[in-house]
Amino acid sequence: MIKVGIVGGTGYTGSELLRLLALHPQAELKAITSRGEVGQPVADMFPALRKRVNIAFSEPTFESLKDCDVVFFATPHGVAMAQSAELVNAGIRVIDLGADFRLKNTTEFEKWYGMPHSEPELLGQACYGLVESAREEIKKAKLVGLAGCYPTAVQLALKPLISHATPLIDESSIVADCKSGVSGAGRKAAVGSLFSEASESFKAYGVSGHRHLPEIEQGLELISGRKAQITFTPHLVPMVRGILATTYVKLNEHGLNTDIQSLYEQHYANEYFVDVMPKGSLPDTKSVRGSNFVRIALHRPQGRDTLVIVSVIDNLVKGAAGQAVQAMNAMFDLPEHTGLEQLPLSP
């Protein structure tokens, strides 16, 4: 059994980790930490976990976590970098669901997250955690900086095109128009997340620059070895879960002469969680709700040179906790779908 610890078990991603790991056949929950809830039974805060999770919250200290094989950080930015070194040095593997170990350039991190990076040496050792593009690195990694939710949806939408040896698109003019549910803002009291503010409304945010932009561009460069330029606009929609990313690219001459549908189907043929849908499909967020799947559909409106790629994920599962468990499975040589075979919830 894999002995698991979770730092930050009271937020949406932390509770989602608990939901998934409670039924994981090879995982044993050893510690769940929270500074403000020490001693409270986890199931008192999350009644859905009654009779499945029978431990209480503990202090987020090394002593609480020292017996774990892997520790997940589901915490605000800055927490994982402050606590990971001691765990890694003790031989405990770390998966950070936050942003502390995503961006490889400390200057970029400090620009977008507004804080200095306290562990640049550890950052250099970290593996970027988009499983479908870094599987072999994750298997050997001591520390994984998990991909963000928007970057997961956009990178998986583009990966077959970007990873092709011959460029098929204009990689300097990609547009990613993305929508997310309110849970992406986290489990905190904030005016913009209140029901009366978000309900019956729809708005863009981060238009002049969003912290997931450099992560997407970095991830695409890791895939292709080439720099790509993205215009990325996120939107908030009045639903709880889900991301729908509509990504627009211009096909070049090679792309126009390539069967793009077949390219995607072949590229993802062996990926358990990636569903390339039949030509002309329009996937919706409900089709992945509560699951670790991503569904992708391709369109060429009016047969012109613009390719429209629609991808959908559950931001809390494939965009966070599910992908973290998938990474853990890869680390410990388990089939990646272990504990992640839940079908989407509908209606």
Image: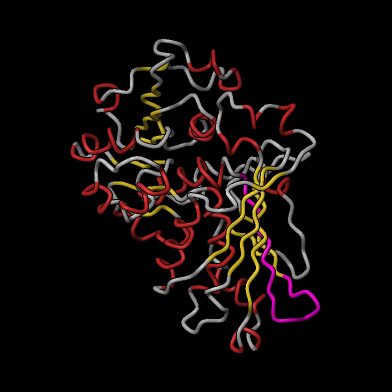
Q: Residue at x 39, y 36 (%)?
A: 72
Q: Residue at x 36, y 17 (%)?
A: 58
Q: Nearer the viewer, residue 33 or 181?
A: 181
State the extent of the magenta-drawn residues as a range: 299-314
Res. 59 in view: yes
- Percent across and percent down for residue 57 are 41, 17
Along the horizontal axis of the image, is 267 left or right of 325? Answer: right
- Percent across and percent down for residue 208 are 56, 53
- Percent across and percent down for residue 179 are 67, 49
8 up-or-down from 305: above or below: above
Along the horizontal axis of the image, is 301 left or right of 332? Answer: right
Count of numbered circles in the view:
0
Along the horizontal axis of the image, is 64 left or right of 335? Answer: left
Write down the quadrant of residue 175 in the picture.
Answer: bottom right
Q: Quadrant of the C terminus?
A: top right
Q: Is residue 2 magenta?
A: no
Q: Residue at x 37, y 32 (%)?
A: 4
